Amino acid sequence: MKYFALYETGANTGLYALGSTELEAESTSDAVTQAEKSAPAGCRTGVWPYQMISGTPSAVAPTDAENGRQYNVLAQPGGTAGQFSPNGQVFASIGADAAGMCLSLQKFFGYRLGLIPTDAKAAPAAVQPDTGSTGSSTVSSGTSSSGSAPSDGGSVVSGGTAAPAA
């Protein structure tokens, strides 16, 4: 089945924007796993299933890993320029992958529906680059304390300020 990623527009906003890369996956949970690899830091990821031909989609039996998975439904009633947001429904992959129900109801409602796992976690925050510093410094009343000597060749000068080496 084909999907596009839905990425939260900011941490805990509950609004989702459609990604631009098409995903091909055997199940909705596989599509979410693929989409999460490109998720913005601190944001949750869902998917929008689609099919290129018109008509009602064929039922697709859920894989063993997909069976029983539950998804919050994201709706885009404002049209293709709008954002996706939760609509309060929950679909489950029981008997058929939840993406098929999503596709069928898109045709009924006349707008796009997406899916996000009910237990979706935000993408990890970006890792700060290692600056090579081995300790922290605190300047107070003209004195400086550190866990180690400055690693960048800096020095503490009178008046309590830290100056980098030239």
Image: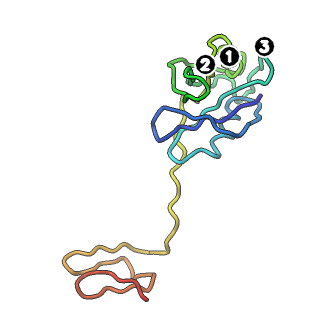
Which residue is painted at 36% across and 72% down in the image?
136
Q: Are marks 1 and 2 in contact (CB under 8 Å)?
A: yes
Q: Are marks 2 and 3 in contact (CB under 8 Å)?
A: no
Q: Which residue is mark 3?
A: 55
What's the amino acid at mark 3?
Gly
x and y percent of residue 123 in the render?
55, 45
x and y percent of residue 127 in the render?
52, 58
Q: Which mark is residue 91?
A: 2
Report, in whole angstroms, how far the alpha carbon at label 1 lies from the one at label 2: 8 Å
Q: Does residue 121 sit above or below 156 in this rendering?
A: above
What's the amino acid at mark 2?
Phe
Is 150 left or right of 21, judged from the image as shown?
A: left
Secondary structure under tag 2 reads strand
Residue 77 quadrant: top right
Q: Which residue is mark 1?
A: 101
Secondary structure under tag 3 reads loop
Quadrant of the image containing the N terminus: top right
Q: Which mark is residue 16?
A: none
x and y percent of residue 78 in the render?
55, 22
Which residue is painted at 66% across and 40% down in the image?
35
**Number of numbered labels in the structure image:** 3
Dot 1 or dot 3: first in sequence order is 3
**Of 111 and 145, the residue lying toward us:** 111
Which residue is painted at 51% across and 20% down in the image?
87
Dot 1 or dot 2: first in sequence order is 2
